[in-house]
Image: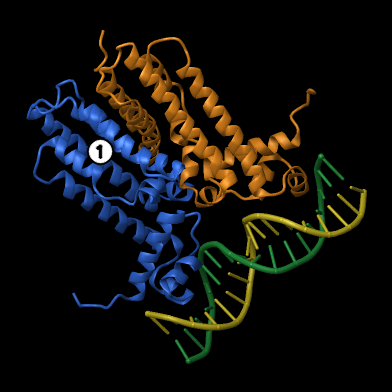
Chain colours: A blue, B orange, C yellow, D green
DNA sequence: GTCTATAGAGTGATAGAC
DNA sequence: GTCTATCACTCTATAGAC
């Protein structure tokens, strides 16, 4: 591996990531990506076969980062409820929404298997990872035995994703914070101390 | 009021509603709306000042319908938990997502006050309505007194909206059903019978 | 690797005939 | 009320010079 300065290819991927987050795939044109990356038409088509190819690289990287960030919280030391709390309450750019979740609303992303795959995999992994944490909480007697790992995990991820939706609709982080507090209260009050 | 047959204006609004649901505002062109409505360019610009104006009529109608549908469940007879359950479990086109919630991801909708308003109002109303139902549940001793109406309401709406996101990501209704079951289990198990 | 030129299709709107 | 023609602009991609 060689040490490179931040090159054009890299800037294109980062530009695409930012624009996909902000405007989605349908709402982002190659030209806009190039301008933000301060790169020309030719550069983009030299490094990538087209819009889809560049978007694919951008989405993959965003998905990898999101997964790593989630895993950092969920695999940290602490009780199950503590780790879930840490995950839900970690610093987030709430009003921007979830960079992966927003792609589920993009018709062209969902219609293109290569673009869709990272989105699908990310949420499948996240639900499974959270379910495992919930299961640990059950094993340790931290949560009541009536709690079902799979559905509780789905409810937690859904509250998070829905929290973004409500925050964007209200143009305030308030409903996001409330949704997180609400789900944690429902979950945490069952803690057996 | 006069009785009209389904006219061109009406078909345009319905066409716009379907396309906004499916592809969002950014992903929908006036031409596509016209074709689906079997209407010409001239008709659209006769009835509406442009894409934005037509989209506004479409979004308003969708918001009104969604609100009426929610109110039907939440104002029905029954306990608070029964009504919340009825609301969450009513028949939905889950894989299509929420026609209002999806608009929060549309940059042009959020940047246009006229288009944004119905979205904002719908969720503000829904959260308030659900909080009122939760409060009734508290008053009747149906829910534990530790439950906070506002945050619990936010968590419920968020679980619903996030359930759509997870279902679309997975291309299955399963995670939606799990999220709903999960939140109801956390909520319902606190029921005092 | 990066540049400019070009292209065919689509976008959103206007004009004016019927 | 609806039609067609037209417009300036953007979209995504290709070609070929440098």
Question: How far from the left and from the top, in percent, is residue B64?
Answer: 57, 29
Viewer-nearest residue: A119 or A66: A66
Assess disc 1: are there few (<14), some (14-19) or many (≥20) residues with their C-alpha within 10 Å of its C-alpha.
many
Q: In which quarter of the image is the N terminus of chain B?
A: top right
The image quarter in which residue A48 lies:
bottom left
Say which residue appears at 40% left-offset and 63% top-offset: A16
Say which residue appears at 76% left-offset and 33% top-offset: B7
Viewer-nearest residue: A44 or B59: B59
In this orientation, does residue B132 appear? yes
The image quarter in which residue A86 lies:
top left
Task: Decide if residue B7 is on the left or right side of residue A167.
Answer: right
Q: Quadrant of the C terminus of chain B?
A: top left
In this orientation, does residue A158 appear? no
Task: Decide if residue A151 is on the left or right side of residue A25.
Answer: left
**Which chain is home to disc 1?**
A
Say which residue appears at 64% left-offset and 35% top-offset: B14
Mark 1 sits on what residue?
Answer: A127
Question: How far from the left and from the top, in percent, is residue A36?
Answer: 44, 69
Task: Decide if residue D2 is on the left or right side of residue A166.
Answer: right
């Amino acid at each position: 591996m060689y040490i490179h300065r931040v090159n054009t290819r890299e800037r294109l991927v980062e530009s695409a990531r930012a624009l996909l987050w902000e405007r989605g795939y349908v709402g982002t044109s190659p030209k806009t990506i190039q301008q933000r990356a301060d790169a020309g038409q030719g550069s983009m088509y030299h490094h990538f076969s087209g819009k889809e190819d560049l978007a694919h690289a951008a989405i993959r990287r965003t998905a990898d980062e999101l997964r790593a960030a989630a895993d950092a919280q969920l695999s940290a030391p602490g009780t199950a409820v503590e780790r879930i709390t840490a995950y839900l309450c970690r610093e987030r750019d709430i009003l921007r929404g979830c960079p992966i979740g927003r792609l589920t609303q993009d018709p062209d992303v969902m219609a293109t298997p290569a673009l869709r795959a990272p989105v699908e995999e990310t949420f499948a992994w996240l639900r499974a990872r959270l379910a495992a944490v919930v299961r640990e909480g059950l094993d340790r007697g931290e949560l009541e035995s009536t709690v079902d790992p799979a559905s509780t995990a789905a409810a937690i991820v859904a509250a998070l994703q829905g929290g973004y939706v409500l925050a964007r609709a209200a143009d305030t982080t308030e409903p996001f914070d409330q949704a997180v507090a609400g789900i944690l209260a429902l979950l945490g009050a069952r803690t057996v101390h």
